[in-house]
Image (spheres, rainbow, N blue to C red):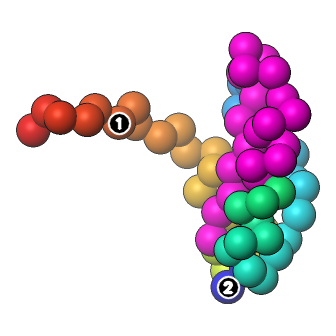
Amino acid sequence: MPYFVYKISPPRVLEYIATLDRYQEAREIVRSQRAEEPRDSGVEYRMIFARQQGEAEKLLSIPRDERVIGED
């Protein structure tokens, strides 16, 4: 299954960037895009592992819960 890379702009607008077969390549694209983006822009760059582009977009369109570290 490939890795899909997306730019996510507020309010949850997905913009397809690339499809890659290797995790390392996808990670490098996401890291370089994040480094170029100003921190206060509200834009996220994400990669997701999915069978096809439609599945990737469906998974990314669902808001993630905030992670709470240290509380059980």
On screen, residue 11 versus residue 15, left or right, reads: left
- The circle drawn on residue 4 is none
Q: Position of residue 27 (x, y in %)?
A: 71, 61
Q: Position of residue 6 (x, y in %)?
A: 79, 51
Residue 39 lies in the magenta stretch: yes
Q: Position of residue 21 (x, y in %)?
A: 77, 82
For residue 52, what is the image quadrant? bottom right
Residue 72 visible at all: yes
54 vs 45: above or below:
below
Q: Amino acid at mark 2?
A: Met
Cβ–Cβ below 8 Å for labels 1 and 2? no
Q: Which amino acid, mark 1?
A: Arg
Residue that badge 1 annotates: 67
- Going by the picture, which residue comes out furthest to the top? 40
For numbered disc 2, what is the local secondary structure?
loop
In the image, residue 50 sits, relative to residue 66, either above or below, namely below
Taking depth in this image into account, of 56 and 7 the one nearest to the observer is 7
Q: Which residue is mark 2?
A: 1
How packed mark 1 is, by other alpha carbons closer than 10 Å (few <14, some 14-19, many 20 or more), is: few
The 10 Å Cα crowd at callout 2, few under 14, some 14 to 19, many 20 or more, is few
User: Residue 61, image x and y in percent?
Assistant: 64, 45
Front residue of this view, candidates 51 and 42:
42
The quadrant the N terminus occupies is bottom right
Q: Residue at x 81, y 21 (%)?
A: 38
- Nearer-N-terminus badge (1/2): 2
**Is 37 inside the magenta-drawn segment?**
yes
At a point 84% along the width and 29% down the height, the residue shown is 37
Q: Residue at x 55, y 45 (%)?
A: 62
Magenta residues, as a range?
Answer: 30-49
